[in-house]
Image (cartoon, helix red, strand yellow):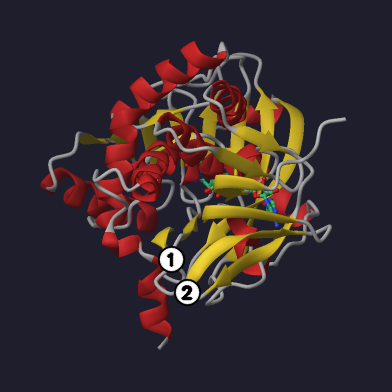
Amino acid sequence: MSRRRNRAELVVVGGGVIGLAVARVAAELELDVLVLERGRVGSEASHAAAGMLSPIGEALDPGPFLDFGLRSLRSYPAFAVELEEESGVEVGFEGGGKVRVALSPAEEGRLRRHHAWSARSGFTTRWLDPAELARAEPAVAPEARGGLLIEGDCRVDNRALVQALLISARRRGVEIREGEPVRGVQGEGGRIRGVRLSDGGIVEADTVLLAAGAWCAELEGLPFPIPIRPVRGQAVSLRPAAPISGRVLESEEVYLVPRRDGRLIAGATVEEVGFRRELTAGGQASVLTAAIALAPELANARLEESWAGFRPGTPDGLPILGEDPDMAGLFVATGHFRNGILLAPETGRTLAHAIAGSGEDGPPEAFSPSRLRKARA
Ligand code: FAD
Ligand code: GLY
């Protein structure tokens, strides 16, 4: 009978896209890594996501989020190829860009302002007037007032990505244990010693990474509570008779993300309802109504699947990445909110290097756990 090990150099709590991305690079840096996942790997937010890789579209203004997102996006082509080679799983990484469509005068004003700062910052965004938009995207509602084309945006099949990360991490020597809930961390004298499992067992570790997404706040024994909250997103998968666009289409109410197999992911609500998992009539109706308002022919699309997931939200909207200031060896990687799929490669790289102490750049100071402590003090 195989015995569970009770020691690792690095224990990663949570097997979502973030935990796996860090674990995989840490193994490449020759750390002995154990991932402890409460349920099935990649079955929470990383499963629920739409897979948009959209730093310019998601940024509200220039700043550390945009810089980190752009770096992550630049690394995606090589990340995707490497993962596909190591895992044999196609991850559906594609360019194609995104068009953000203005369906009202107010949306047009906001999009034109977005266009102005992105153009000033040197990004390739282009304003499409109604006639250009109708030519470029004939499925978009004819009353649209124009659109912002963001050429550099990409997308990936996030569910396939998680499977590829799982296989690749295992091939690199990471041990991944599913069905293993962690109750909390154990520290002594200002230093991490390991984690306590829900069944009372202890796993000792030199370093622990908390990557439990929206559930990080529930872990016990932390020097300071992690200010993470769940933000529910309901989404649906549609199958139109024929593809409506090769790009992501988006209004302020909904996005439509094409998959290679002909599905279209439409999402998502943004709801502050705690960990309530249920799908609601109102949430589903709002996504579907907005999808049809953006591309009217979707009224005839087949509805294939509906789901909800919990984005890990933070008070200032930025991720929490880095070492805890009060417990040496305790690292955090959460709070990726709407963009964890986009930010996975750069989070994986910077966190793994910080943990291994390799001397390479770690995560940006703007994302450090200590900023939230200072803010609260
Ligand atoms: P998760 O994927 O939630 O993983 C956390 C893991 O930790 C889970 O597997 C959980 O079971 C495990 N866990 C929790 N508690 C414990 C414990 N005590 N012990 C052990 N394991 C534990 N991002 C994008 O970049 N692009 C998008 O288009 C996009 N669309 C989205 C659409 C929706 C509807 C939603 C909900 C999110 C979307 N996101 C998108 C955001 C993205 O999904 C998240 O930011 C990302 O998945 C977070 O990854 P994670 O690994 O931190 O969390
Ligand atoms: N990034 C899309 C979402 O979180 O819904």
Side (left or right) of 56 relative to 177: left
**Disc 1 CB within 8 Å of nearest ligand 1 atom:** no
- Quarter holding the N terminus is top right
At horizontal 70% and vertical 67% (from top left) the residue drawn is 274
Q: Whole-percent x and y of residue 103? A: 44, 46
Side (left or right) of 360 relative to 69: left
Q: Give the mark nearer the N terminus: 1 vs 2.
A: 2
Determine which residue is flagged by label 1: 328
Q: Are marks 1 and 2 in contact (CB under 8 Å)?
A: yes
Determine which residue is flagged by label 2: 190
Helix or strand or loop: what does disc 1 sit on? loop
Side (left or right) of 108 relative to 19: left
At horizontal 28% and vertical 40% (from top left) the residue drawn is 70
Helix or strand or loop: what does disc 2 sit on? loop
Q: Dot 1: few (<14), some (14–19), or many (≥20) neighbours within 10 Å?
A: some
Is 376 placed above or below 15 here? below
- Quarter holding the C terminus is bottom left
Under mark 1, the amino acid is: Ala
